[in-house]
Amino acid sequence: MPVAEPLPVPAGLLPALDLAALVRQPDGRFRIAGPVPGWFEGLFTPKVDGHISPDETSDFLSVFLPLAVAVWDGDQTERLMSGPFTEAGVDGAERTLEATAVRAGGEAWLLLSPPVMTFGTAQRLLQTARDEALDVERTRRRHAEREILLHCIVHDLGNPLAGLRGSLHLLDGDSLSEDDRELVEIARRQADRMRMLIRDVLGVFRQEVDAMMPAAPVPADAAEALRQSAGILGPRARLAGVAVEVTAPETLSVVAEERRLERVVTNLLENAIRHSPEGGTVRLGARAEGREVVLTVEDEGPGVPSEARGDLFQRLRPSGSRGQFGLGLYVCRLAAESWGGGIAYEDREGGGARFLLRLKTPRARLS
Amino acid sequence: MSQTTIRLKVCLVGVPAVGKTSLVRRYVEGTFSEDYLTTIGVRISRKRVEVGGEPVGLVVWDINGDDAFAPLQSTYLRGAAGFLLVADGTRSVTLDRVLALREELAEAFGPTPCVLAVNKDDLEDEWDVDDERLDALRADGWELWRTSARDGTAVEEAFDALARLAVAHARG
């Protein structure tokens, strides 16, 4: 049976593979073999006689080439790969390349090309990433178990507290002297505060577990979150004599998880109502700013004193004059950061507080 | 008569996200970016400095962070006249790792000058490394700087110290 002759390698193959091939000459300089890709122009200083010395202009190759000599001068058929390196050429433009030294056809070859991920590298990256994901999943499960335990403890604390609050309400009658009524009122306020603290502690644990969840694949509607929160806390605002205004477009997509975003906004709104004077207005707003969406919650209260701002969003924050925030703002920060966003505070012009929640807009998904 | 410029290779090493690339950018270009883009392989920058009144061409090799995803390659480190070991002051575990790395470097390349940069000094609220520990390292003979690539604190000083030690080492 006749054996077909091997086809000659076409001249355009190397540039089509984005590869520049150089052959080492006996004097240690190199000659370019065949046509080269566009990025090769301006990489090295060209020599008049067609020879180039890459190690004269590349700090990376000045280290790599002596190592390559062992491959070129040896009998082995193995090749030496440099790994990716980023360096400016003689034209001042940075390129990221990879060098391969190989001996073929009796010649010493230096191949330069943009890096391509090998199967082994890809496998190692995927393997490590998946191991890490499993670790996160295990940690999340442990946190969830702790949350259940905490719920049990808090439930045990909450029951007697409910009894205490009920008894204090019953005591609040006309039969008490004015001094006693004041004492009962103080005890009731403290019991209410304890109830809020218990709720905040639970909220923090829940958020810390949620923060380890992968990002939600479906974006949330920030404008709808504002309207929902305003609806939920509307009755409380009316009781406090505070008006709530929402200024937002019909829809505004953000990278967030809908249920948690609503909780974050509700938390900020609840703070704003609590610190508003009677007759004041709380303003909720949402607007697009470049590739971000900014949600604002403004009140006309006293604002946050400057000495309390540094650790406003910290977990272990000492109670200040606006210490009623409890852990709520820490919870908000955790949620915002888990979506790649952030939270900030600034004074409102004309007095009051303004909280800004910055969230990313979702990228278009490939079909 | 013009002076010959000594060219010295120095390498930045440490675990990922400690601020190696940001330190190089601050030192070479005087800039800082909040965006984190992990380094793959090595990025080479150059800066001319003076050590003891003599010109030195510093070739700075910013090497990818050492972790399970991309372990350090010895080919990148070969021929270094000095190492800038970088830790993140807000993650004390990165200091443990880079100190262990120094032992590995000494074993592979022999005695080579090292300077330690404990970076992110500007993040005071999140700082996680005890002053006592840094004092103990200084007492052990470490050239150690608390740096901030963001505001530039002690960046020049750390690189200048490395250049000075590297020149002395190169001259034997």
Image (spheres, grey):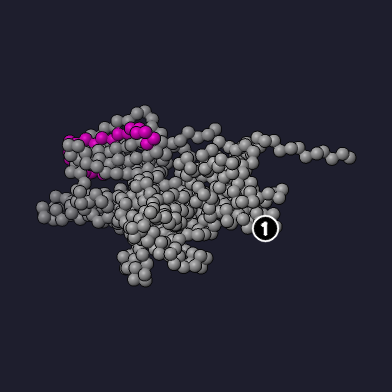
Q: Which image quadrant: the N terminus of chain A?
A: top right
Give the farthest residue toward the right: A1
Q: Count residues near mark 1 (Cα–Cα under 10 Å), then give few for <14, some for 14-19, many for 20+.
A: few
Would you say residue A19 is visible in this rendering? Answer: yes
* Outermost residue, bottom side: B140
Most distant residue in the front direction? B1
Q: Is residue A285 magenta?
A: yes
Q: In which quadrant is the C terminus of chain A drawn?
A: top right
Who's the residue at 64% across and 41% down the image?
A: A33
**The numbered mark 1 sits on a residue in which chain?**
A
At horizontal 54% and vertical 57% (from top left) the residue drawn is B75
- Drawn side of residue A2 relative to residue B81, left or right: right
Provide residue B167's location: percent of width, then percent of height.
41, 61
Q: Which residues are magenta?
A: A271-292
A159 left or right of A39 in image: left
Q: Position of residue A193 (x, y in %)?
A: 25, 52
Residue that appears at 39% across and 53% down: B2
Q: Nearer the viewer, residue A177 or A316?
A: A316
Return the residue at label 1.
A74
Nearer-the-camera pick, A271 or A179: A271
